[in-house]
Image (cartoon, helix red, strand yellow):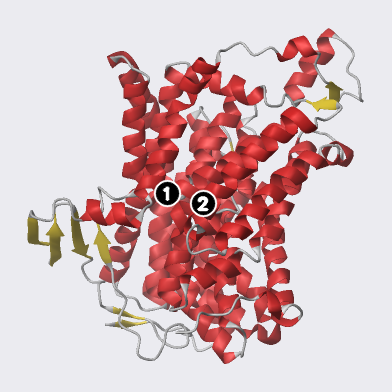
Amino acid sequence: MYHQNYNPLGNVALSTIVAAIPILTLLYFIALHPHRDKHGVRHLGISAPWAAFFGVIAAFVVSCLAFSMPVKAAVSAFVYGSFSGFLGIIWIVLAAMFLYTMTVTTGKFEIVKESIIHISFDRRLQVLLIAFSFGAIIEGTSGFGTPVAIAGAVMVGLGFSPFEAAVLNLLANTAPVAWGAIGTPIVTLAAVSGLDQVTLSAMAGRQLPFVSILIPFWLVTTFVLMQGGKWRDAWEVWPATLCSGASFAFMQFFASQTNTFHLMTDVVSGVFSVICTALFLRFVWHPKTRFLLKSERQALAASSPVQGGAVVATQPAKEEWKYPYTIGQTAYAWVPWMILIACCAIWGMPIWKAYLNGLLAAVKIKTTLLGSVFAGTLSLPTWQMPALHGLVQRMPPVAPVNAKPEAAVFAINWLSAAGTGVFVAALLTGLALKLSAAQWKEATVRTARRMKTPVLVIGQVLGLGYLTRYSGTDAVLGLAFTSAGPMYPFFAAYLGWLGVFLTGSDTASNALFGSLQRITAQQLHLNEILIVATNSTGGVMGKMIDAQSIMVACAACYDDPYERSHALGPIFRKVFWHSIALAAVIGVICLLQAYVFPGMIPKLPVK
């Protein structure tokens, strides 16, 4: 039995610094290590696979030497994380990119692109519609990086640069994350903390709507400044920005408070925001000037003078708005995305998951694999990870005194996994679009080539995350936040943020720190619902800087393999301070609710 030790060096500060070495190593090689590219130009940050590899080596050294974790247990934890990452993230993104590639191969994506452009030719408003509202729908149905992949690919298809598309979608994929994949983070948080699920959802729904109004403004401003525009260019579209954010926030608050819709909060909020914003732009308001991409402004400047200081051009004349496709053609082109949303929603239903997990229950499996039990049914085989399952004990104050040893069971839910739902959507899309044999082959080959590097990186980083979890180094870092005393409500957000950065998932962060948040709240006499929910709402702001999410964005947005491998560092450096600032916003909201507006905290149901 490996008992986690949260001060192995006898000095809290030194133990914390050592525990941080794997993360610091990963960050250094991602964002700071100098190197020269194939053209001899000096850059910061090395290729993503090598950066992840050095982080993994550091994690093994710290876990096995400084924290005295058995080597076999460390290897098992790393393998467990990599395997879980395949079913939990890689499988989803592979299938989503396969579906997207089909729409490109058949030419249907061009119609989707035109239909989006004709809602608004203004690039600022396209960012709102795609990255924020449409991305929220995908997050609500499937989560785990899918919205960044799908919405990022759509934006690149519309002409946005790969770097811009990746950054903007990472920024947008924040406020909806707490209810991603049909509320999985909230369900997990309730299970780990022992608190009521609907009450936790209601608490999150009284924090994130403020951010949901802020994010669209943040998003548009970031985009405008990246394009060389000015603050006034971002403010010019404030009516549409407010409509997009406020409609989402209103429905987010309403749905999160109900027994019926709280797990579908993102889906209903995203749909409502898309409809409200599209109708507002079509029938109520449109900007006087049209903001263009740099490349478009350069092309326009070459042919005619540009009004507005080379930043904006006048709104196009009426005849320029003529739409080249029929309603039937447009509806047919959108079929793949409707299939995707429907399949993800179905696969997110607990009753459907239970049905699939029991579908082949009659076929029993029981054998031994590497000295450990591999058993279950054909539809849900499980593998107790050797040298790890039941052999790691979390200790107080991270876990209760009577906590059971940590389980390490790899459940191969190959039928009920969210990625299977996305893959089914891809297959149905191929049939609906009537792909030829050559097109099936082209879509498969292009997807495999695009995902080769991201799969390698995501597998390594998730293995690293599981290694830090089972060695206890993550808990050491988390405990550093608990010494904040009365300021703890502010730092509770950063504990969730740290969890998402380490694991790449708000769900995993809630599983990691949900219990610690409740224990700390009890010790400091703070409201448990507030503090535990803040783990999830603060955690969503770490989503944009975890290596898995960034690599998903790279896979979706970059066609060139070299750029795809080396984009991790520049993207990380761009979004890092946004992540820090937005986590602080959640921290301030939590602090105010703890001491100034405690009436905003929902009451636990009376049992």
**Residue at the image point whose x is 64% and y is 48% from the top:** 171
Residue 553 at x, y percent in the picture: 53, 40
Q: Name the residue beneath numbered marker 1.
A: 458
Please say whether residue 569 is visible from this viewpoint.
no
Residue 114 at x, y percent in the picture: 61, 19
Q: Name the residue beneath numbered marker 2.
A: 547
Horizontal arrangement in the rendering, residue 227 relative to residue 249 (left or right): right
293 vs 584: above or below? above
Marking on residue 343:
none
| Quadrant of the image containing the C terminus | bottom left
Three-letter amino acid code at the position of disc 1: Ile
Q: Does the residue at mark 2 contact the one at mark 1 (Cβ under 8 Å)?
A: yes
Res. 592 image quadrant = bottom right
Residue 398 at x, y percent in the picture: 46, 82
Front in this rendered view, residue 31 or 262: 262
Three-letter amino acid code at the position of disc 2: Ala
478 vs 553: above or below? below
**Residue at the image point whose x is 72% and y is 28% from the top:** 282
Q: Secondary structure at mark 1?
A: helix
Q: Earlier in the sequence, mark 2 or mark 1?
A: 1
